[in-house]
Amino acid sequence: MGHKMLPVIPAGDIRRRVAELGAEISAHYQGQPLVCVCVLKGAFLFFADLVRHITCAPEIDFVRLASYGGATSRGRQTVFTKDMEVDVDGKHVLLVEDIVDTGRSAEFLLHVLEKRGAASLKICAFVDKHERREVGVAVDFAGFPIQKGFIVGYGMDYAEQYRELDAVYELVPE
Ligand code: IMP
Ligand code: MG
């Protein structure tokens, strides 16, 4: 009942891509008030690396979400277990996620922050995973597109394991 870990994205590729994303984001927002929001826990390493490449003096904040409900998306409820502290009214907001998968977490955050008066809302995801997308959420700045599979490392976990790894692996049952 073990599993294998297949290398998917090496640490060097991550470093290069994160620097590119930072440059893209900096060019997009130059001179405008920007709040970068880290969606905990999965995005913590990506966020820490990314913001060091963002040159437009962003404010930094953190949220953590939990979702309740069954295996089906219908009736699934997303709530904050840690809400933001920075006021987003009139500011541009960049949500930084580890993975956008079904898109439900991102949809929830977009909805809430729009109501709080964000001037614009965009999503940056380390991995844009298409296979299980349920809602029409667009990833504006995507690190790596991945079709399917369960991945860990670089912040992403399986049962709270593997977050500390500096590369990304696919977990494959043996
Ligand atoms: P969703 O887009 O609302 O389905 O939520 C995406 C969240 O599910 C991500 O932020 C991850 O925390 C988690 N997740 C989805 N796919 C994976 C995976 O392959 N590995 C680890 N976590 C995942
Ligand atoms: Mg997550």
Image (tube, rainbow, N blue to C red):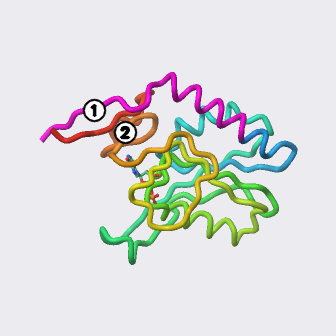
At 85% across and 49% down in the image, what residue appears?
32
Count of picture labels: 2
- Above-or-below relation of 118 to 5: below
Q: Earlier in the sequence, mark 1 or mark 2?
A: 1
On whether ligand 1 comes within 8 Å of the CB at mark 2, the answer is yes
Q: Nearer the viewer, residue 148 or 96?
A: 148
In reply to whether residue 15 is colored magenta, the answer given is yes
Q: The residue under label 1 is which amino acid type? A: Met
- Residue 50, x across and y down, in percent: 63, 35
Q: CA distance from mark 1 to mark 2?
A: 9 Å
Question: What secondary structure is marked by label 2?
Answer: strand
Q: Crowding near pointer 2: few (<14 within 10 Å), some, many (20+)?
A: many
- Above-or-below relation of 83 to 96: below
At 38% across and 68% down in the image, what residue appears?
68
Q: Extreme top residue here?
A: 12
- Residue 98, x across and y down, in percent: 50, 45
In reply to whether residue 41 is colored magenta, the answer given is no
On the image, numbered disc 2 is attached to which residue?
A: 152
Question: What secondary structure is marked by label 1?
Answer: strand
Q: Crowding near pointer 1: few (<14 within 10 Å), some, many (20+)?
A: some
On the image, numbered disc 1 is attached to which residue?
A: 5
Q: Magenta residues, as a range?
A: 1-24
- Residue 156, x across and y down, in percent: 42, 41
Q: Is residue 169 left or right of residue 50?
A: left
Q: Is residue 85 left or right of residue 161?
A: right
